[in-house]
Amino acid sequence: MGRDAVDTERLAATFIDLADTLVDDFDVLDLLYVLVTRCEELWGLAAAGLLLSDDQNRLRVAVASNESARLLEIFQIQYDEGPCLECYHTGRPVSANGLDSADGRWPRFAPAATAAGFVAVHALPMRLRRDVIGALNLFSDSRVPPISEQEMPIAQALADVATIAILQDRLARSRETLADQLQGALNSRIAIEQAKGALALQLGVSPEQAFELLRERARSSRRRLTEVAAAVVRRELPDAEWSKSEKPK
């Protein structure tokens, strides 16, 4: 049984849906489900699944269009074998149009995929330049022919758009983390400057000397400098506690 040509209107709508995720406040998980379900619909696939690497470069099952695909994705990770793993490690597309004869290539995966009813599989890298963050698996059964070589660039383009969105989200999260760290450092610095001024006024010393007193108190009490500074600002350390002997010469 043949497969109808890809519905160009549906394809255009899919690209629009994926592109819409490039704006703020999008749901990455929703994006991934759009990718696998639309690939399944566009090419009449039996299933589609996606593996993504975590921050320690370990592959994890991100989404799958059905349970059979999800179990096969897990199977690949557990046995470190299969088209998705090969695609991820090489950064290149991997195709097998006859899984029943691929047991020499994947002795565990091929029989498992065949037993699940799949006859062909294509794995596409989730890649931007040299960064490979995962792989998209497209499974076919006997109902329709596998994706043709001429159609593969279209499927890869869909994966590329999703990859850009995922990397953008990761970058945004990294920037948020960095922004939080910078804001924390800024807040700490403000507290220290306030404490220096307050302590200098209380003890009649220079701001530099006040800072040395703060550092010495932090070390002797085994507290963070910002904690001591905050205590000074809140006037939790009375003037009497800063003995004259503590003043630097």
Image (cartoon, rainbow, N blue to C red):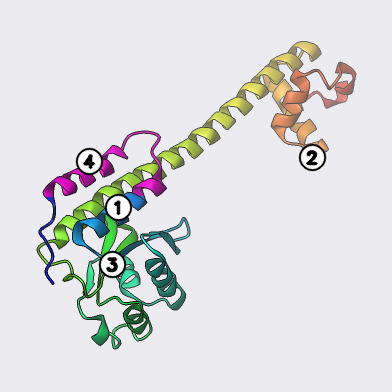
| Residue 196 spot, x, y in % from top left | 70, 19
**Residue nearer the viewer, 134 or 61:** 61
**Residue nearer the viewer, 182 or 2:** 2
Which residue is the site of mark 2?
222
Q: Is residue 32 magenta?
A: no
Say which residue appears at 16% left-offset and 56% top-offset. 154
Mark 1: secondary structure: helix
Labelled disc at residue 16:
4
Spatial distance from mark 2 to mark 1, Cα to Cα?
Answer: 53 Å
Spatial distance from mark 1 to mark 3, Cα to Cα?
Answer: 14 Å
Dividing the image into 4 quarters, which one contains the N terminus? bottom left
| Residue 125 spot, x, y in % from top left | 27, 61
Which residue is the site of mark 1?
35
Mark 2: secondary structure: loop
| Residue 81 spot, x, y in % from top left | 37, 77
- Tell whether label 4 touches label 3 (CB within 8 Å): no
Q: Is residue 48 above or below residue 83?
A: above
Spatial distance from mark 3 to mark 4, Cα to Cα?
Answer: 24 Å
| Figure quadrant of residue 39 | bottom left
- What is the span of residues highlighted in magenta in the rendered image? 8-31
Left or right placement of residue 181 versus residue 6 in this view:
right
Camera-near label (2 vs 3) is 3
Left or right placement of residue 172 versus residue 215 in this view:
left
**Residue nearer the viewer, 116 or 20:** 116
